[in-house]
Image: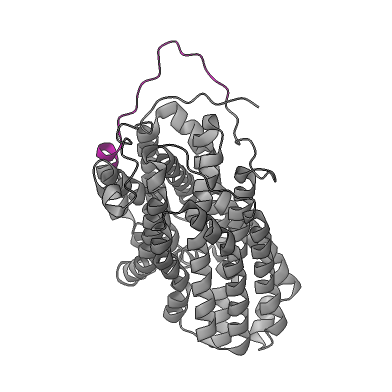
Amino acid sequence: MDQMTREPDASQDTSDTSDTSDTGWKALLAPPHGLRLMAVSIGIGLHAFNEVAIGPVLPIAVTALGGVALLPFVYAVFFASIMAGGLSASPLRRRLGARSALLVAGLVYAVGMIVQCAALDAYGLMAGRVLQGVADGWIVALCYTLIADLFPPRLVPRIFAAEAMVWAIAAVLGPFAGGLVVEHFGWRLALAVSVPVIALFFVVMPFALPADRAKPAGAAPVSHALLPPRLFGLSSTVGRGSWLLFLMTAAQSVSTVFLAYTLHARLDLSPVHVGLVLITLSLSWSAAAIPVGNIASVEKRQAIMRAGPLVQACGALLVATGLYLMLLPIVLFGQMLNGIAFAMVFASANQAVIEDADPDHRITTSALLPALETSGYVAGAVIVGGLGSLFQAQSSVMAGEPGHVVFALWGAAAGLSLLSFLAARGVVLKLRAA
């Protein structure tokens, strides 16, 4: 396999890493890390806000455009485009440099937003979502590479804790903002609800990131592998860690696909109350990510990471039990455990994979992680979609006979969590020198 020759660009700035003793929030927020953290958070926040704020608006938009039958494909092309963007982010960065690549991605995102707002039919809306999906994939993947390169390893756990808070803010504000704009201004303007975030993106990025450095004149072109080595292997932290992240997100896809529908049909919850149940996961993730990120001991963080999938399995079974017994507090407790499980695993697993990657492939590996996690949701949705069809999930829930359905679906989620537990046992968290 071809080896990647790392080009010096905006992300390769280690001038401030001499002090390796301070791992606190004060060190993360001090110059130059504070402004860089803001840039990374805006990029990841744009991705999160676009997903959670636009999602509730799409059914209204597709219906208004007379293409309700295409609604599943609108979602599918968006997630597929995110994966395509994640896969191509590393080559884009090598060609343009990190800062320029992010600005190009922001422009493509803005164009996609304009296309979907001006759509005359559902196909035009899909075209806009494709552009935004590719840009989304570029942005979040490039931000992951910046986490690996712009910050010393000692600060990475706190960075992921900060990004968990960004997701929580997006989960709370996104649906509220989208719904409010739909109600008062219509669905077209609601599709542009992320305008303030993309504007802030363009303001902060040029100042937060070092300038891209030109490639040496006459430099020979280098061949690059699309996928880094050892991904999805069974004998390394890179391989086991990629399985851990993939399987945990696949397990969570059961709730992503079926929980809202089942809450409404089984417990007769209003859309507002369904939304409150759904954001419980993000809020508990963020709340737990802060104390987990404050743990300095690598050994303790590794032990917590390896236990996370078991907590997720318990959460899945509690959700199923709560739905079966029609007891909302049990469902909420299960959702909280699922969020805590991701807080226990997410930051440490990502960092372990990045640190174990071959030095020549660290950028490619970092850029690929968001696409890998998205692929877990896609694969999980296919699995649980098949199970839902097999057990006639929707009709069974509506008929008031959900027992075998909820335990089959969330039991499958628990099974995937147990597989991720086996993968986690081979993930070793080690920190390279800053």
Q: Is residue 88 inside the magenta stretch?
A: no
- Relative to residue 307, is residue 11 depicted above or below? above
- Relative to residue 232, is residue 222 depicted above or below? above
Image coordinates for residue 219, horizontal then vertical, percent: 46, 13
Picture colour scheme: one colour
Q: Is residue 173 left or right of residue 406?
A: left
The structure residue drawn at horizontal position 35% and vertical position 70%, both measured from the top left corner, is: 176
Asked which quadrant contains residue 411, the reply is bottom right
Asked which quadrant contains residue 321, the reply is bottom right
Give the prevailing secondary structure in the magenta stretch.
loop
Image coordinates for residue 128, horizontal then vertical, percent: 45, 50
Q: Is residue 218 inside the magenta stretch?
A: yes
Can residue 141 be spotted in the picture? yes
Q: Quadrant of the N terminus?
A: top right
- Near-viewer residue (122 or 396): 396
Image coordinates for residue 179, horizontal then vertical, percent: 37, 70
Q: Is residue 421 left or right of residue 92?
A: right
The structure residue drawn at horizontal position 55% and vertical position 62%, both measured from the top left corner, is: 71
Q: Quadrant of the C terminus?
A: top left
- For the record, the magenta segment spans 205-223
Mark count:
0
- Near-viewer residue (397 or 142): 142
Q: Residue furthest top?
A: 218
- Relative to residue 256, is residue 429 depicted above or below? above
Can residue 268 be spotted in the picture? no
Image coordinates for residue 116, horizontal then vertical, percent: 42, 53
